[in-house]
Image: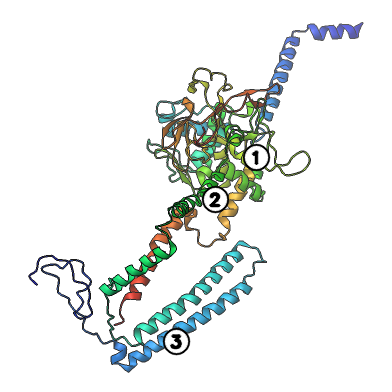
């Protein structure tokens, strides 16, 4: 009898409500955290609240004038809600942001923020809404399958960026950037987020392994000599034609004149 | 000479030639004659002559060294050792060695002729091409004799059938040019239709993995081939038509905000929730149009810069193309994969005669 009344007492005690609420909070909160963990599987970076605060401060000082006080966007610049830390790390890390002047395309300039500040900005923007995140280190190694990477590059990228990433022209003042000397992390992030007019290559289109193979291909081409001799900026037939017309044809003209001239 | 313009007299072997002019001008430019002979340094000074001889010798020796170095390079950078640096060095030095080996012989020979061989000016008589009257009369006689003996003018039937045969014999060669492209029913099979059919799944180039509609996010670009177009037949043999069919069936898959699409009447259900598919083959000369600008919705062809507006059913907004890119009607199947509803409604790619 005493046991039963004890149990009854627990269930009907005034603290029961508190216990039930606590249990409910733990279950729902834990479930949410678990679900979030799956969504953020790619991120190897957990941003701290301090970073987010710092990022918010930096954002208000440097970015809000175009992107809006809460990154909601203005006429001058798009909303950053949902662009994720990958976009910020790419744009700020390569120096494209803070954007300098309006025009068909943003130009890469001197990087204006330190790595820590870039991370803080990324933390702030990532906290606004879920979005593509900074890639894990293991996808940036350059020991991927360069043959496969080359095939994927030629199919998806070479039409704008040139067969070996020397860059190319688009319409009305836009252009595809040269990929030589670009950090593998930024290459990955550009593919993932599709900056400016570049299309988006999400992880279902080009899997992280595909992206790593492409990065390996680009770094291989960058670090190895061209089998054909002097690359002439890898611009292909136009550069070679220019060389032929100026130097080879010029040389032929000089020799022709020399042939017909009398010796002194 | 104060004569007015008159026809030159024919060369009769007695008078000086008149330079071959058909018309004699009243005030002709006076013949300046030969330049005064300029004596070369190598003729004036034995030291210069020896120097020139040394230069020629040096050039020939340089040629020998270059040819020898080319042979050395062939063995020093063997192609069996397949590193890029090695291939590059092999090609470079072989090329330079052979090039200078030959060039130095030529330059040496020309230098020898210009500096050491005699340089006295020589003039050659230039006769009139017109023959004398007797020669011309004799020629006419011979032609007439040939005509008489062969009977060319007399025998009309022989002459006319000869003309007919000569006119017709090149024609088969010209007709053979028709082999450059498909003809007749072949046109329908090869040019009007592609490998897309109702229910063909859209698959990623080059590995053929099918694409789910949920994979395609706004701003994405997928390079697409039909999933059922295989490089190898089921029996293991190579599909001979694979490359040709792939070249026609290449498609670009893009997702935009449905608001940005302006489908014309009858094409409202050709897209799926903002996902559209267009032929990748430019309607100008056939280059793959894949340069997609995400925000302007423009598709640029890199060859001649034809620009197509995706928000206006790929109508041409710039450049030499004259027709919009054909659209592939798509939908999703029961499992969520994107499939074609049918083949394109018009032939893909550039114009052809029977289009």
Q: The residue tagged with tag 2: helix, strand or loop?
A: loop
Q: Residue furthest bottom?
A: B46
Label 1, label 2: how far apart the Cα atoms are: 20 Å
Q: Residue furthest left?
A: B2
- The residue labelled by disc 2 is A164
> Colour scheme in the image?
rainbow
Quadrant for the N terminus of chain B, please. Answer: bottom left
Residue at position x 38%, y 36% in the image: A103
Residue A28 picture location, percent across and down = 70, 19
Residue A70 seen in the current view: no
Residue B182 picture location, percent across and down = 58, 40
In front of the other: A105 or B181: B181
For residue A72, the mark is none
Left or right placement of residue A259 versus residue B218 in this view: left
Q: Earlier in the sequence, mark 1 or mark 2?
A: 2
Label 3, label 2: how far apart the Cα atoms are: 46 Å
- The residue labelled by disc 1 is A208
Name which quarter of the figure residue B129 lies in.
Answer: bottom left
In front of the other: B43 or B187: B187
Residue at position x 28%, y 74% in the image: B134
Callout 1 environment at 10 Å: few (<14), some (14 to 19), or many (20+)?
many
In front of the other: A8 or B227: B227
For residue B57, the mark is 3
């Amino acid at each position: 009898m005493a046991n039963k009344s004890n149990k009854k007492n627990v269930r009907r005690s005034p603290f029961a409500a508190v216990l039930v609420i606590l249990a409910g909070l733990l279950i729902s909160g834990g479930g949410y955290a678990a679900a979030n963990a799956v969504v953020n599987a790619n991120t190897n970076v957990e941003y701290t609240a301090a970073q987010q605060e710092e990022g918010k401060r930096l954002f208000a000082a440097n970015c809000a004038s175009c992107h809006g006080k809460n990154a909601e966007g203005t006429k001058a610049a798009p909303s950053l809600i949902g662009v994720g830390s990958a976009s910020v790390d790419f744009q700020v890390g390569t120096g494209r942001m803070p954007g300098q002047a309006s025009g068909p395309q943003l130009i890469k300039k001197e990087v204006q923020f330190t790595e820590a500040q870039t991370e803080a900005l990324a933390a702030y923007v990532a906290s606004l809404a879920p979005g593509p995140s900074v890639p894990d280190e293991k996808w940036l190694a350059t020991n991927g399958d360069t043959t496969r990477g080359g095939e994927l590059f030629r199919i998806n990228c070479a039409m704008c960026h040139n067969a070996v990433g020397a860059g190319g022209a688009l319409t009305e003042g836009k252009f595809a950037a040269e990929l030589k000397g670009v950090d593998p992390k930024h290459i990955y992030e550009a593919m993932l987020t599709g900056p400016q007019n570049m299309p988006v290559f999400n992880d279902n289109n080009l899997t992280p392994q595909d992206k790593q193979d492409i990065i390996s291909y680009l770094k291989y081409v960058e670090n190895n000599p061209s089998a054909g001799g002097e690359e002439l900026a890898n611009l292909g037939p136009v550069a070679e034609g220019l060389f032929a017309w100026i130097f080879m044809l010029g040389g032929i003209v000089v020799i022709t004149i020399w042939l017909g001239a009398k010796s002194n | 000479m104060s004569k007015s313009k008159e026809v030159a007299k024919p060369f009769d072997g007695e008078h000086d030639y008149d330079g071959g002019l058909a018309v004699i001008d009243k005030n002709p430019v006076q013949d300046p004659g030969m330049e005064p002979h300029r004596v070369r340094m190598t003729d004036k000074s034995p030291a210069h002559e020896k120097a020139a001889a040394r230069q020629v010798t040096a050039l020939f020796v340089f040629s020998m060294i270059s040819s020898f170095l080319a042979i050395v390079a062939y063995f020093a950078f063997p192609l069996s050792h397949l590193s890029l640096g090695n291939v590059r060095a092999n090609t470079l030095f072989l090329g330079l060695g052979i090039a200078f080996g030959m060039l130095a012989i030529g330059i040496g020979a020309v230098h020898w002729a210009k500096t050491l061989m005699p340089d006295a000016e020589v003039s050659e008589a230039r006769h009139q091409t017109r023959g004398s009257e007797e020669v011309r009369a004799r020629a006419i006689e011979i032609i007439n004799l040939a005509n008489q003996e062969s009977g060319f003018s007399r025998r009309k039937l022989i002459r006319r059938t000869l003309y007919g045969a000569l006119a017709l014999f090149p024609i088969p060669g010209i007709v053979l040019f028709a082999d450059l492209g498909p003809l007749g029913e072949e046109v329908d099979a090869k040019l009007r239709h592609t490998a897309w059919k109702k229910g063909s799944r859209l698959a990623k180039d080059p590995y053929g993995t099918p694409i789910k509609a949920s994979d395609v996010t706004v701003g994405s670009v997928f390079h697409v081939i039909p999933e059922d177009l295989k490089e190898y037949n089921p029996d293991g043999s190579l599909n001979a038509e694979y490359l040709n069919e792939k070249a026609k069936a290449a498609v670009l898959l893009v997702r935009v905000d449905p608001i940005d699409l302006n489908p014309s009447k009858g094409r409202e259900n050709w897209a799926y929730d903002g996902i559209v598919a267009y032929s990748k083959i430019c309607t100008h000369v056939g280059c793959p149009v894949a340069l997609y600008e995400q925000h302007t919705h423009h598709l640029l062809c890199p060859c001649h810069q034809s620009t197509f507006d995706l928000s206006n059913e790929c109508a041409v907004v710039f450049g030499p193309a004259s027709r919009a890119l054909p659209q592939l009607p798509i939908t999703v199947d029961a499992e969520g994969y994107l499939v074609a509803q049918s083949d394109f409604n018009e032939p893909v790619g550039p114009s052809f005669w029977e289009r």
